Image (tube, grey):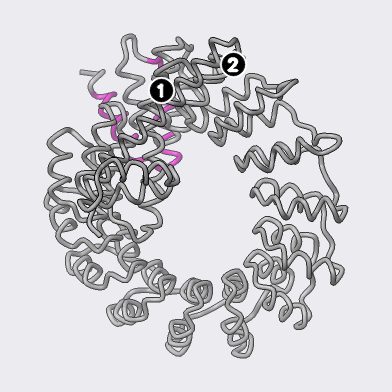
Amino acid sequence: MSAEVLPDGVWRKIFRELDREGQCFAAALSCKRFLEIESDVFEERENKATAANNDARRRGGGRGPRAGTGTRARRWRGIVTRLKGFLKTNGGMRASAEYVKWCFGLTDEGDLKARKMLASVAAYQGHKDALVWLRARGCPWWGAKMCNAAAKGGQVDVLRWLRHQGVPWDVRTCYKAARRGHLDALRWLRSEGCEWNEWTCSSAAKGGHLDVLKWARENGAPWNDLTCTEAARGGYMDVLIWARENGVEWDEYSCSEAALGGHLDVLVWLRVSGCPWDEEVMCRCAAEGGNLEMLKWIRDAGCPWDEWTCTRAAEGGHLEVLHWARSQGCPWSEYTCTHAAEAGHLEVLRYLRREGCPWPERVCDCAALSGNLEVLKWLRGMDPPCPWSEGTCQHAASGGHLEMLQWMRAQDPPCPWDEFTCGGAAEFGRLDVLIWARENGCEWNEFLICRYAAEGGHLPVLRWSRGVAGCHWDEMTTWAAAQGGHLDVLAWARSQDPPCPWFRSECLAGAMGRGHAEVVDWIMKENRSAEN
């Protein structure tokens, strides 16, 4: 059915029922019309949320942000988060050139990292016209990551164009193409002199691309035991057999990765074929993978277990595995609870509580890390309530879980907080959390906020901290940006009037020590400019 069959009003009603962070995003990627509808629905939701928060303020609750606070920033950060995941996992979706341009319109000149990411998305999708459009508007390239993104998408035309523009590449470019099975792209890269190393073969094995692996080996690509490890993790028996028949080495990680991946047939073949294993880790790997039959087979083979077997099963939410392990006398510990809470597995936590698993006081802190409000509510609803502390708010803020933090502070009495709530928000780039916390009276250390933001490379946080909140900065701010490789942050800080102070030699040493060549080059140019 085409979008034109239904009127806009019906589509808006449908979009209101979709999950905001997942389904709406996927639909918006599909066509320009859905993008426009998704934008309207988002604005509608934001207006309702703002009205509710303002109403709470008028009633004296003091819980919500002021009208209009950070709406554009929240919108953009949500898109950045989803596009990062999209670029990392592919997910079978396509981001249109129009969507990339629209996202660019939400940024400004200071959002260098965000703009670089958008350029990488365009390269990955093969939108050469969008790249030209972005470049004409001053969008910076992301160094070799641009070619890596194009190779990952198999976009030979874009790769050719990028190279004509002088964009560099590195050994990762070849293995990105190999990982996705883009043999044509890999052939072109090699014909143009792009270097490769052992990662090309291991990446081909990781994706199960035997044809790519064969071609790479026929053309002199090096390999090592990681090829077997990656093939075992993916369960690619044909790749594993061919690699061994052609003389590649293996080690105990092949067995542990097969267990993690849940591939019992591969593990059996590995052991029959003489592959070594580390008995001490096999049970916890099987439990983490959630394959009960795998765990049973490993136990029958005589491998020992310890409390980390139960802990890994709990962390993965594998209740059936946890049940069986406990029925067979496998030990557990307080880490079993904390890992389940951090992963947000409520049913596992209920089972652990019911069966008397050791229960530490920091469980609420771990639940706050996951952002699972349902878990935190259950923990606080126990009799007596599971204790919380300032660290609970800090963990929620660090994770960007604003709704959770708001709920925690709305309780009677509220969960306590301190300056580290704001510090965690700044360090991890959670500007909406930082703004809300400050508007609702949370303390902070204004002498450290800028350093935290610079260290994490969060330019929007730094700009707000300086421009709106008037936070102090000093030489540690520029040093943190330099040693973290955050050129956009460093350049912006030094471009202000007056500029953020720095010890040029210390910044240079920090950047060189971490291998941030782009930052080193910039500092050297600044040094020459100052001398002239």
Residue 103: image tag = none
Q: Of the residues tagged 1 and 2, which is closer to the observer?
A: 1
Residue 141 figure quarter: top left
Q: Which residue is mark 1?
A: 70
Which quadrant holds residue 105? Answer: top left
| Image side of residue 95 versus residue 250, left or right | left
Comparing 38 with 267, the one in front is 38
Tell me which label, 1 or 2, sits earlier in the chain: 1
Residue at position x 40%, y 43% in the image: 515
Dominant secondary-structure state across the stretch colored magenta: helix
Which residue matches tag 2? 444
On the image, the x and y values in percent for residue 53 come to: 51, 20
Residue 252 lies, with reference to residue 2, above or below; the image says: below
Residue positioned 14% across, 58% down in the render: 160
Q: Secondary structure at mark 2?
A: loop
Q: In the rendering, at what x and y percent does residue 150 appear?
A: 25, 56
